[in-house]
């Protein structure tokens, strides 16, 4: 129930489990990856599930809204003209990463 003194806070999922999780769209060329290094200037090094390490940039829409750290799981859209670079379009939270692991979307890359 919303109370006026809460100043716009939304209710939190008390169970700590992910209700809806955005999955990568294969038609758009999206792929899952793990952030390995922060490079500065909105650039990151991301190890993708196809065993390619890409230099990625954070989309303008995400720059101030989602803070990305090393070890975070993200969705990457590789560039069509340069496969070793891409754009980060989504960052997953802890419960969402657990859900992805349980459902088989997130498998550790084989080196």
Image: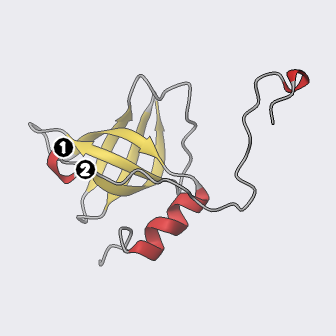
Q: In which quarter of the image is residue 103?
A: bottom left
Determine contact: label 1, label 2, CB under 8 Å: yes
Q: Position of residue 93 (x, y in %)?
A: 57, 52
Q: Classify 101 as above or below 69.
A: below
Disc 1 residue crowd, few under 14, some 14–19, many 20+, Cα 10 Å: few
Residue lying farthest to the left in this orientation? 81
Which residue is located at x 42 percent, y 42 percent?
90
Left or right side of 66 for 55: left
Which residue is located at x 35 percent, y 58 percent?
47
Say which residue label 1 marks. 28
Q: Which of 20 and 88 is in front in this view?
A: 20
Left or right side of 30 for 100: right
Q: Name the quarter where the N terminus is drawn.
A: top right
Left or right side of 90 for 50: left
Left or right side of 95 for 75: left
Q: Classify 39 as above or below 52.
A: above
Residue lying farthest to the bottom in this orientation? 110
Say which residue label 2 marks. 25
Regarding mark 2 in the picture, which secondary structure is present there?
A: loop
Q: Which of 44 and 91 is in front in this view?
A: 91
Disc 2 residue crowd, few under 14, some 14–19, many 20+, Cα 10 Å: few
Q: Nearer the viewer, residue 37 or 110?
A: 110
């Amino acid at each position: 129930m919303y109370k006026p003194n809460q100043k716009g806070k939304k209710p939190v999922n008390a169970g700590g489990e992910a209700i809806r999780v955005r999955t990568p769209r294969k038609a758009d060329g999206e792929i899952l990856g793990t952030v390995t290094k922060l490079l500065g200037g909105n650039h990151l090094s991301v190890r993708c599930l196809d065993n390619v390490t890409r230099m990625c940039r954070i989309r303008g829409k995400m720059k101030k809204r989602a803070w990305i750290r090393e070890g975070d799981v993200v969705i990457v859209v590789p560039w069509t003209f340069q496969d070793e670079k891409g754009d980060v379009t989504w960052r997953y939270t802890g419960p969402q990463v657990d859900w992805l692991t349980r459902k088989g979307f997130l498998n550790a890359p084989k080196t």
